[in-house]
Image: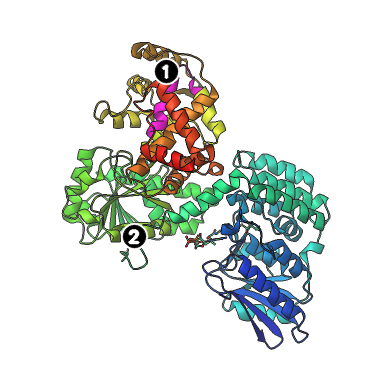
Amino acid sequence: MTVVFTDIKNDIAVITIDNPPVNALSHALRSELSNALEGINNNTKIIAAVIICAGRTFCAGADIKEFGKPPLSPTLPDLMEQMDEFEKPLIAAINGTALGGGFELALCCHHRVMDVNAKVGLPEVNLGLIPGAGGTQRLPRLIGLAHALQMITSGKPINAEKAKKLGISEKVSEHNLLEDAISFAKGADVRRIRDLKVDGSTEEVENFQNKIARRSRGFLAPFAALDALKASMELPFEEGIVFEREKFMELVSSSHSKAQRHLFFAERAATKVDGIDKTTPIRKINHVGVIGGGIMGCGIAINFLSAGMAVSLLEISNEAVAAAGEKIRNIYQSMVNKGRISEEQMQTAINQLNLITDYDGLSNSDLIIEAVFEDLNVKKEVFRKLDNIAKEGAIIATNTSFLDINEMANVTTRKSDILGLHFFSPAHIMPLLEIVKTDDTSNEVIATAFQLAKNIRKTPVLSGVCYGFIANRMSSCYGREAGLLLLEGATVEQVDQTMFDFGMPMGMFTMLDMAGIDIGVMARAKLPNGSYDERAFSIHAELVEKGHKGQKTGAGFYLYEGKEKKHNPEIDKIAEKMAHDFGISRCRKTTKEIEERCILALINEGYKILEEEIALSASDIDVVYAFAFGFPRYKGGPMHYAEHLGLKYVVDRINEFAVQYGDRWWKPSSLLVKRAKESE
Ligand code: T1G
């Protein structure tokens, strides 16, 4: 299939790239573009050329699927070099998102004309890479080091207005991009970015290193990008290009980049569900009802308000609903204060909010999400009421994070319209949305939920019904091992530091103190005896009994004095007493054991979830854990990490733990054992 077309308009050549879905710079595209450029260069009747892309976007980068395979010529750097030697003015006409290699290709053109809605960016760090086709050498020459540092280490694209301000593009096209690019080409000259000097200093790079240290902790790519940007100042252009390429080749075969590329495709694969495709009807969701004005209810409402939908938020009294309104307003005001949104955007969103105290106010809602207290009977009562007042075809959802949604659906007459939409706290920030289907949820309702997730910019993953679905069910196993390790002699700080060093945003006990230890204790109190390890959560229960619920009470697994977090000696005493009561011997725990107990517990439970078909795929589980709990993306998620460790090694370690600690929990999933054999 041909993907590059050349058309001559008077004395201007128009090269159209058409390689759906995102004009990725595959080998076929590179070869055909190289041939087209050569032809135009040798055609004396042509004075200039425009490169434009068909479809929704300019080239969105190198073809990620080609990474890890033997490079085919012309490679992207070959093509860039050819474009650098192009003798006629070359104009890039940019629509959609020119990203990575696509933006680097545009930087090899002599001028750039951008559609008013277009964006440009170098997001390679999100794939564990650095720009590998000249981006780290050309961008700082064009816009200065400071802006290049920001764009390349954050990976965030910028819009046409900002790109014009920075001098990336010389024209913003409001209406007809091709015409504007052709008319620009008529008067254009040959201007090579490679000939420019970098405006900046090496100190800037060092200062920037400190600035990104915290947010890029554990990642390789952002720091490799700093080295390449430093080289852009210290080395001549050609040597800088060689330096960049060496760094790129190191990264492309690294486990970090393999893991981050895995997550890139896993996130997209999670939206593909058997039985659901473009023909599956999707319901229109213009008006959303939210029941419960607590932290979760308000966060959920903000997602829909920010996406331009009307929201009715219901609470039991005028005081309570007014307080919820205030909470939402304060969250928006802090977004304005941080410059994330404009005053006007805040007002537009808040104007869509309707505060109510009567269920009848939800009778026209297309979707109703309940976020009331986590009690099955309370939720069933809400579902009964909604069944009476909701209009036909309305979707009714629960934000429960662990309760049985089938039981909620069974009290209604519209079971196929019921599902779980499980947001993570803070709901207006955390990217993951666990879509939980019951035994009866229709494909139409599931498809509508996936579309909705896209509209509110969430990363959706489908889960079946079980206690805690995918996310919290796995977390409870990690939490179990963390609790047992305290009884066996590890300290709170040791367990948290180990998991922090592993790459988690924080340790289990810091997370529990932040979320509130009482939430888990209350949830477990409703579980049948023996369904969880009481020993592992005995310290949690003791703390809550003493009124120590975490940060909100100034004491939990740590003591809190203002922002300061301190060791809580009470924990050591409780742990010793509980260990004695349960007959658990105590000794010094190694970091290796702590890490493996916590991570292998996650992995084993992941395989059980897969076995029970609660999750559709291992990569879905990776997306859940990376996007809900911040599992280090450069490790790809627990299931990808298990492959990295080697499944045989994982099974052997689990069996060793079974010998040491019993096989109540350390029984390898049969699917894991089977996969380990296959992998051998
Ligand atoms: N290579 C291969 N496939 C790609 C791709 C790419 N670069 N980008 C997207 N796809 C596939 C994607 O998997 C999906 O496939 C379909 O296209 C639609 O994507 C040398 C080293 C452009 C903003 O990091 O950010 O250049 O699931 O669902 O939501 O320096 O795709 O349908 O089978 O995401 O509209 C740098 C990656 C590469 C950009 C569109 N580029 N892409 O978002 O659609 S590295 C990137 C995106 C590089 C050079 C280096 C987004 C998008 P399928 P989609 P979307």
- Which is nearer the N-term, disc 1 or disc 2? 2
Residue 22 position, x and y percent, is 54, 66
Type of amino acid under label 2:
Ala
Are discs 1 and 2 less than 8 Å apart at CB?
no
Q: Which element type, helix, strand or loop, lies under badge 1?
A: helix
Q: Is residue 594 above or below residue 451?
A: above
The magenta-colored residue range is 476-493
Residue found at x 62% / y 45%: 254
Q: Is residue 439 visible?
A: yes
Numbered label attached to residue 487: 1
Quarter holding the N terminus is bottom right
Residue found at x 72% / y 42%: 207
Residue 100 position, x and y percent, is 63, 59
Left or right of 222 in this view: 642 = left
Numbered label attached to residue 447: 2
Q: Nearer the viewer, residue 270 or 678?
A: 678
Q: Residues within 10 Å of mark 1 (few under 14, many from 20)?
A: many
Instruction: Tell me which corner region of the image, top left, top right, bottom left or bottom right, holds residue 292.
Output: top left
Left or right of 501 in this view: 581 = left
